[in-house]
Image (cartoon, rainbow, N blue to C red):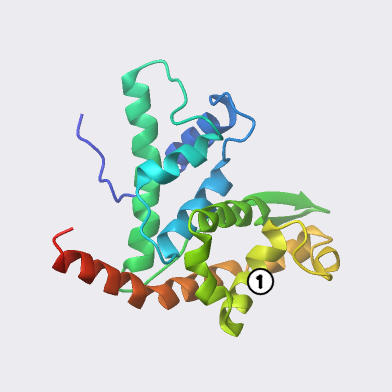
Amino acid sequence: MKNPDPFAPLTETELSELDHFLAFDVDSDEVMMIDMLDGFLHAIAAGPTTIHPKQWLPKVWGPGTFMPPMESINRLNQVMSLIMRHDNRIIAGLESEQPEMTAVWSIQEYRGKTYDQGEGWAYGFLEGMRLCWDDWKPMLDTAEGKAWFRPIGLLGEDDFSSDQNELTKTPAHRAKITDQIPEAVMAMHFYWLPYRLAVHERQGAKGL
């Protein structure tokens, strides 16, 4: 069987398969759900520091678990392929000639309407930031950086601001904030891009 394109986006069936695996096949209460994983990987892709998968993969499964037990090496390879393809697709989207961000949100139905809900995604993004929080601080200390971070903080942190409860009290309120996240993440990505390119060039010059 031909190996799939490592940068091909996951199909709906593959995304559902990964979602099911995370939800039911990992014996940990702290494993990331699919929306958290998506936010987590976006933070790593958009942020200031290149982080190797061996550093971030254990965070996906929960504390103390480097890799969850699976029934076979084939199943292990299958799940890892899905995660790495999803990661590659996020990176490729941000770094394409026409950059784009397509997030995986959770959905909530409320009073006959369906709303995107970014709480889990924002929490995952914060977990990605925490892998190198000090490196993020120069952006977070700027007025622009604070504005970009605001929708993520409102949805992902427990005590972000005094007006947080009022701003997030209904699904419609939270959906409105969720809609602000793609533009904010793209702005973060562009903020850090010159820095990442400079680091890459220095490492290339050193033969790293």
From the viewer's side, name the closer residue of 11 and 174.
174
Residue 136 in picture, x, y percent from top left: 50, 68
Badge 1 amino acid: Arg
The mark total stands at: 1
- Taking the view exactly as shown, the residue that stands out farthest to the top is 71
Residue 77 in picture, x, y percent from top left: 32, 29
Q: Residue, x 36% and y 58% (percent of image)?
A: 50
Left or right: where does residue 141 sit relative to residue 15?
A: right
Residue 153 visible in rendering:
yes
Q: Quadrant of the N terminus?
A: top left
Q: Residue, x 38% and y 66% (percent of image)?
A: 94
Q: Residue, x 29% and y 69% (percent of image)?
A: 199
Left or right: where does residue 48 sit relative to residue 143?
A: left
Label 1 residue SS: helix
- Taking the view exactly as shown, the residue that stands out farthest to the bottom is 143
Residue 179 in picture, x, y percent from top left: 63, 68
For disc 1, the marked residue is 150
Up-down relation of residue 90 to residue 75 (above or below): below
**Crowd tier of the residue under label 1, counting other residues whose Cα lies within 10 Å: few below 14, some 14–19, many 20 or above:** some
From the viewer's side, name the closer residue of 9 and 144.
144
Q: Quadrant of the C terminus?
A: bottom left
| Quarter of the image where one finds residue 197 | bottom left
Residue 180 visible in rendering:
no
Up-down relation of residue 164 to residue 9 (above or below): below
Q: Residue, x 48% and y 35% (percent of image)?
A: 18
